[in-house]
Amino acid sequence: MNITFLGAAGEVTGSCTLVDTGSTRFLVDCGMFQGGAEAYRKNLAALELGFDVRELDFVLLTHAHIDHSGLLPRLAMLGFRGPIYATPATVDLLSVLLPDSAHIQEKEAEWQLRHRHRRGRGPQGVAAPLYSVMQAQAALQLLTPVPYATPRQVAVDVTVSFNDAGHILGSAWLSVTVGQGKRQRHLVFSGDLGMPDRLVLNDPVRPPRTADLLLVESTYGNRLHRNIAETEDEIVAAFDRTHAAGGNLIIPAFAVGRTQELLCMLIRLVRQKRLGAQKIYVDSPMADLATRITLAHPELLDAESRDLLAWQAAHPDRLHIEFVADIERSKALNAVRHGAVIISASGMCDAGRIKYHLRENLPRSESTVLITGFQAAGTLGRRLVDGARLVRIFGEQIPVRARIYTVGGLSAHADQAALLAWLKGFATPPGRAFVVHGESGAAQALQEAIRTQLGWPRVDLPQRGEMCSL
């Protein structure tokens, strides 16, 4: 059996692993590369597997985030027709995320064409969408839901179980059994693991006692998140500072997961009277749909979040949430000069309506930008976190005068301590362990921590294109 690392090896995005058992070929995730000038080129080449994609038998999907799912439409466009197995909530979220990903690409290409036309240039150099909205919708027909903790035989020699990873709604780590008898192998793919004791979702389920192969994420493998109490203090400080300065508070947030966690946290702060009455604008149609999907799966929510949502529904005068769908309403928010709290996507600031709100508010010293999540290298959000005083948005140079707050405790990813705590669930070290889905510093730090603190002998850092055999 061969395992080939096609993405998220030595970097965070583009999660995709090829498993070839000798009789069955399948992918675990099929994610889009994001951030940096090379992302588009890597996405074009990502599915050059050395064989026809129609020879793939199926895909196992850990969760709905685009860096894990975003190339599924391209896979189908290239001829894949097999099933894509995922949890029911992931299937629901993908019905929103994949068409939205295509829509953003189409709009970006249209904008580049208009921009070049105004400058008297031709279409050369404009990045064509990786797939269309229609192709994204076609890929949705391949999705096959599998509930948590329900072993599913997906091939003669392959059985998979999806287990709650606590990262976003429907996220899972995968337990995959390949072969039978003495040749049976047990593979574990962590996907993205969430932090324990957090709002909205339940804690990640513990891993099995042992495995022959483990792939574990390392997004924050070199960091410890601030605790929730400190995080809430930072959020309150950002609200107070913005109110005193007379500006707007702009919060880039991932439409899935982060927006819902932020809303629950704001409900809690208002309920505790740490914040006064608030009106929150959620300017993201996708976040609106993702929130509706979240509410449609109450069985996946933790008890505290269900209680907070019930309280908010009974006290809309204390915290009013407006989901902004209409584009004209979104534009009108840019005319608001003070008092607006706007949560908008995308979370890394590289696409979506957030770019318009940043263009309007970054030059204003009285406004605040609250960064609430991981910002990949090369993204606009990363440049803001790194202290850039001038950024380019829609081809314009925008000065950064707004106050930039970075809240470190809201990540949907487990930090180093949480990753190690989850890994301690293995009674014996896996036969082979690979640290993936992390920039080099984070992956190396987690590798060293696993070796020194857990005593595991075989922990490796794969590179893109590398193959290992079991």
Image (cartoon, rainbow, N blue to C red):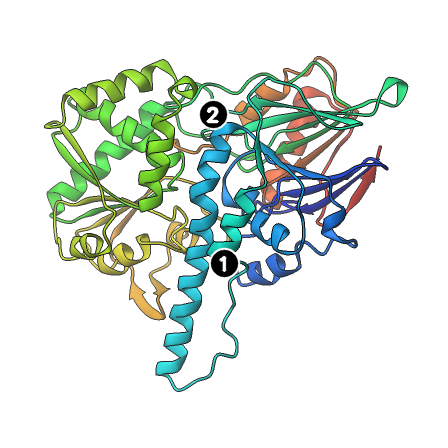
> In the rendered view, does 453 fall on the left or right side of 374?
right
Q: Which mark is residue 122?
A: none
Kindly identify which residue carries mark 2. Answer: 195
Q: With respect to residue 78, does 114 lie above or below?
A: below
Task: Give the alpha-carbon distance from disc 2 to disc 1, as whole Å.
Answer: 35 Å
- Front in this rendered view, residue 139 or 14: 139
Q: Is residue 32 visible?
A: no
Res. 150 image quadrant: top right
Q: Position of residue 131 (x, y in %)?
A: 53, 58
Question: Mark 1 Cα within 10 Å, few/some/many (few <14, many 20+)?
Answer: many
Q: How dense is the environment of label 2, judged by Cα within 10 Å: few (below 14), some, or many (20 and up)?
A: many
The image shows residue 39 at horizontal and vertical percentages of: 56, 58
Residue at the disc numbered 1: 132
Mark 2 vs 1, N-terminal side? 1
At mark 1, the secondary structure is loop
Identify the residue shown where x is 58% and y is 47%. Answer: 72
Q: Is residue 385 left or right of residue 84?
A: left
Q: Is residue 270 above or below residue 217?
A: above
Say which amino acid is labelled 2.
Met
Quarter of the figure with the C terminus: top right
- Where residue 303 sits: x, y (%)? 35, 14
Q: Is residue 202 visible?
A: yes
Please, what secondary structure does the residue beneath circle 2 have? loop
Which residue sits furthest right? 182
Residue 320 lies in quadrant: top left
User: Which residue is at 60% across, 27% downward?
Assistant: 173
